[in-house]
Amino acid sequence: MTYSFLSVTRQAAPDRPPRRAFAEVLAALTGIGFLVLAIVLTQSWFDHHLLPSFYLMRRWYVFLESSSRIVLALLGVCLLVARPHIGRIAAERPAALLAAAIAAVLGIGAGQLVLSRRYPSTEWLLASIEPLRRPDPRLGWTFVPGREGHKTVGGRTISFAFDAAGYRVRRVNEPVDPARPTVIFAGESVMLGEGLNWDESIPAQVGALMNVQSANLAVPGYATDQSYLRVASELPRFQRPVAVVTLFMTALLGRNLDDNRPHLGPGLVWLPAVPHTRLMSLATLIVPFRREPTVERGIAVTGEVLRATAALATVRGATPLIVVPQFNREDDLERTWRRRILDDAGLQYVFVEFDDGWRIPGDLHPNAPTARRIAEAIADRLQATPPSASTRE
């Protein structure tokens, strides 16, 4: 009786092939791993490792981060439920799994090849994008000087004119005069006036409000250290600088951590660009993961750069000012970053917060009324500061 029972048991539950057992164990471990990640990847973890960019507002990041935890949990459950099916495929059709793995590897290689051939440089140097840029060995890129270009933004045709020095001006034949009292502006596309004509841009409106010449040194895509390097190279040209206005946003903090461009390290040491594959750059853009020490170093260097920018202005007798526009309501994390970088360093800044209706339709840059509010805040602060004797008309 015993022998007969054991025989029947073995026939009813035969030993699984090693290939199938391995596939089921691997699927189970992967599923459990996804479930563990869904539990441990809390919002606090995301806040310390994923920094939002200007092109994706933080509230959207929070939504996507919460959704990703749900997706991880669902994947984990699906793998656990489908474990027997996966094992059966591995046992019966191992060639199909091998072919899928080879196809995935070849797909990654093909993607890298296509991206490298079609986009061999950074996105800021695409030849067909106005305003046109050119490579710069120290800054990464600057504008092509002495020309005018046009583009359509929000249903309007926008004109971009640059003088021989590469500063945005009303017309090419109306260059900035370095001998006149001048308010100098540094930053990226918001300060440049992306999507706005010259008269609507922040520097132009401040100049009109204060009846003083403005010099727009901003370049799209610049991080805080690039803006500092541009001010350091251009400020000596101006004989009577009134103020140096720099733009900073916590939404750009992630950009300050990028090393695929010339950048500044601790101690303001200039460092060359670190090459990355195009796929790696794309992956970093989609999932901007940063190790916590990298984030802390970026916060420290950003504060160091802003203090150095203020020092450049002070040495020349100009008023240093940082403008901090906040598009959409500031949350607790953004407030913490702002205070750590600016308040703890004792830097002078003007904070301008917006809720709704601040952007150009179909674009993420501020519209003309928003630029006007920022310009008025800057002008009010600068006019409350007595000018030095060297900057008076």
Image (cartoon, rainbow, N blue to C red):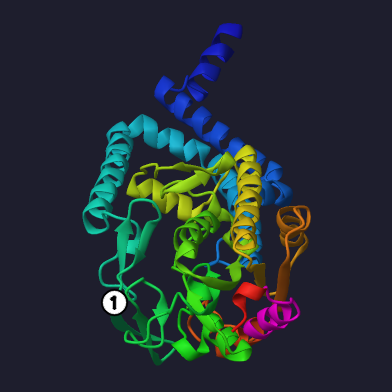
- Residue 20 lies, with reference to residue 32, above or below; the image says above
Residue 386 belongs to the span the image colors magenta? yes
What's under tag 1, amino acid-wise? Gly
In percent of width and height, residue 308 lies at 61, 53
Position of 36 with respect to 130 (left or right) is right
Q: How would you classify the magenta stretch by its main secondary structure? A: helix
In percent of width and height, residue 243 lies at 61, 72
In percent of width and height, residue 230 lies at 46, 60
In percent of width and height, residue 7 lies at 51, 13
Residue shown at 59%/63% (left/top)? 316
Q: Quadrant of residue 184?
A: bottom right
Residue 120 belongs to the span the image colors magenta? no
Q: Quadrant of the C terminus?
A: bottom right
Residue placed most toward the observer, 124 or 236: 236
Residue shown at 42%/79% (left/top)? 176
Q: In the image, which residues are magenta?
A: 375-388
Residue that extends furthest to the left in the rendered view of this protein: 117
Identify residue for label 1: 146
Residue placed most toward the observer, 141 or 289: 141
Residue shown at 61%/47% (left/top)? 301
Q: Quadrant of the N terminus?
A: top right
Position of 241 with respect to 111 (left or right) is right
Instruction: Let me know if residue 369 appears in the view.
Output: no
Residue shown at 30%/40% (left/top)? 105
Q: Quadrant of residue 203?
A: bottom right
- Residue 384 lies, with reference to residue 234, above or below; the image says below
SS at badge 1:
loop
